Amino acid sequence: MGIFEPYRAIGYITTDVPFYVQRLGTESFVTVSVGKAFQVFNCAKLTLVAVGPQLPKKIRALASYRDYTFAAYGTDIGVFLRAHQVATWSKHKEKVKMLLVFGEYVLSVDVKGYIYIWAFKDIEQSVEAVGHILLEENFLPTCIMHPDTYINKVILGSQAGSLQLWNISTRKKLYEFKGWESSVYCCVSSPALDVVAVGCSDGTSIFITHVMIKRLFHLPISTRGAVTALSFRTDGEPLLASGGSSGLISIWNLEKQRLQSVIRDAHDSRIVSLHFFANEPVLMSSAADNSIKIWIFDTTQGDARLLRFRSGHCAPPLCLRFYKNGRCILSAGQDRAFGYFPSAGERVTIMSRLHRGATMSSITTVMARLEMREWPARIGNIGRAEIRERDWCNVVTCHMDTPKAYVWHLQNFVIGEHILSPSAENQTPVKACAISACGNFAIVGTEGGWIERFNLQSGISQGIYVDNSELNKCAHYGEVVGVACDSTNSVMISAGYHGDVKVWNFRGGKVKSIWKVGQPLTKIVFQRTNGLLATAADDMVLRLFDITTLRMVRQFEGHTDRITDLCFSDDGKWLLSSGMDGSLRIWDVVLARQIDALSVDASITAISLSPAMDILATSHVDHNGVYLCETFGASHFKDEIPELVTLSLLPKSHWQSLTNLDVIKARNKPIEPPKKPEKAPFFLPSVSTLSGQISFKLNEVSKDEKKDMQTQEAHRTRKLDASSPFCQLLQSCADEKDFSAFTDFIKSLPPSTLDVELRVLQIIDEDEETTNQRVELQSIGLLLDYFIHELSRKNNFEFLQAVIRLFLKIHGETVRRHLALQEKAKRLLEVQSSVWQQVYLIKGKDVEEIEQERTWKKKEDMGLLQDFNQATLALQNSTTLDPSVTINDKKRKIDDV
């Protein structure tokens, strides 16, 4: 198990598999395919009501009957009761292509012309087919339908253009119509008896009779492709809706046999399904563009308008960014769409694609200020800032082959009124964009090397960045692959394709420093928290630069193909990279090594890690959705990645107080001592003294009472561990060899309470003859066992260091005096040394300095750990320490060894 585990995919609405609509009571439901699973929507508001499980293969056909759903995948057919699979039908030898619910039976048709008949009554007991039909070898079925009012009859359309009428009960072919030498794509029954409509690949729709199987008339529905879907209106209006491979929907008047209206740009891809709801002027459509739309015919001219829809990206996203502290994801892809995903995945908002017939009153979440024909090419990069979301535009996008950048106001889901157009004489496409941390400025870089800063509120240019040493008098010679700025608007960083990274004065626009990478750069990412800049080059090497010290501090190698995206964790300790080699790699910046890697079937094109580091979003080649991976905590992946050292997530003040309790007590000590009362209360007996001070008279205790009190005190001392919740929990966890409950308990204690619990176990009046029998000694040994166990697991590192320091300060002398405790302390030292080797600080240091520090740290781990006091050092040297020995003497001694 790795750091990231697949969680869910969002942004999938439907695929190129036809949907299936059924009515249950007063509501209608539509079942759609989303690849290897299916979804069920309530048609009233297109709300998601059910999601099926992941199947081994992609779904190729769907059908529904009441609470049952039938899904064909590969050569099998899965039967689902709501979302639970209750049976699997396995009889076909070839891929199943079509399903049809036929009374109490389901017909399945494969690509070779085998038809199997399945009964789903008592489905859990019977999974065998009740019959089958083999079509002719040259008849390759493309569609199947049941003509209304005809018992046991189905019509099959073929790729060659012929149609056949079959009786399912007798398994006999009744009639064959040779067709029109054009492939049949769809076939539907008309409200008029004995009439069906057939859609063909040549763009015509032909009406035929069932009985005579002859052509009545034809409609030249489309001149730009095949007719792929048909549906009749059933509320009394003689209308036929047809969808084509070009994405438009045509509405035909059957009485006049002419075109009544056209819904242009209804979809961005081939129409897959059309369905008029029974006795309603409402049409549902789906297409291969990953969208479902519902149209209503309520205008005075009888035209359709968009009522509601659900859509995702119709082409793979190329850029992902978390937004609103990880609650949302911004996405941009090859389909010219700018998406807004809630990370919970409930509903996707596609903001830049104008849906035909949509109005701002009916669809408030669609950015529709630009007409579709004016919208530029696909989005290449996104810059965002949340601090000014309520004031003005806070997102900027750059588009392929477009010399302008567009701004967006996500607070109102509208595109901004300002368009950022660089003032260069040679207008070239904008390739990089970023927004300053303050949210006031946008920086854009072009393909020609021009970089310019704009004010987001007014859209006015605030200056350009020019390197006078460049021949073209621009910022870079060649394409600008990335721009970024620090958190204080002090510097701006830019990278050019030819391998030059430049640091600029943010306001003055002057170059401060230049790095020559030596390789063409493809992508950069800047972490404002620690000031590190990561670059990806054509040589598949990741390089990290510190803009404060202006030095390269890290270099990572591992990818074997082009690096597609980079991402820092919010704390700057992890760098994530994806490549066309199908890998996602996680690099630990502190340890300077790769700590995990994922291999995927489809190469990752974009990645983004949430600020809380709990969700990783990825997009993939040939996949229109956004995939979410859950980040597992240390408790989940500690066994698979034992090198990781995790922290306790406690407030810094909590564990630091354990190491500074003496200072805190001294600081809280009262300035003046408490004053004695002038007179004793009347109810307390007192005696007079020569000094005149009040002395209280103590109750006299008999010898027998004194003896009883001594006995009770001795008994209390022996039973100390048994009566303390601290020691009871420690003992029980030691017996079970699981100290997680004890760790949670001491983490919940205030520092002062934990200090008291440790001091209660302190042995002050040691007697060599009786000390070994003291129960406190056993508890001290259990504490050492606890430290060894927890340090070896590498959890709660900083908290355990503070507790160990406090423990050694209180019980260090006791540990030194007892041989059994010494052995445990030596083991603790070994574990501590091995864990401590993995903790380094790297900021502002090159590789050679780090290696030197590692060498010294290994020596220091032999006995100079700062968290161990003099008692621990004595265990290693087996001699009593001399307080006069200095640290330098200890270092020399280690060097001699």
Image: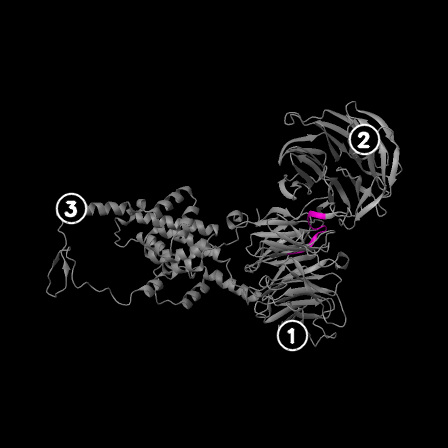
**Magenta region includes residue 315:** yes
Q: Nearer the viewer, residue 170 or 205?
A: 205
Quadrant containing the C terminus in the rendered view? bottom left
In the picture, the disc for residue 509 is 1
Q: Point out residue 751 in the picture as x, y percentages from the top left corner.
A: 37, 56
Q: Nearer the viewer, residue 337 or 749?
A: 337
Q: Amino acid at mark 3?
A: Glu
Pointer 2 or 1: first along the chain: 2
**Magenta region includes residue 214:** no
Q: What is the magenta segment's predominant secondary structure?
A: strand
Q: Marks 1 and 3: which is nearer the front?
A: 1
Separation of residues labelled 1 and 3 (CA atoms):
90 Å
Q: Give neighbour class at mark 2: few <14, some 14-19, many 20+ (Cα, 10 Å).
A: few
Query: Tag 1, which secondary structure?
Result: loop
Q: Amino acid at mark 2?
A: Leu
Q: Point out residue 369 in the picture as x, y percentages from the top left corner.
A: 71, 59
Span of residues in magenta:
306-320
Label 2 sits on residue = 193
Q: How many numbered marks are there?
A: 3
Q: Amino acid at mark 1?
A: Gly
Query: Tag 2, which secondary structure?
Result: loop
Q: Point out residue 504 in the picture as x, y percentages from the top left corner.
A: 63, 72
In the picture, the disc for residue 705 is 3
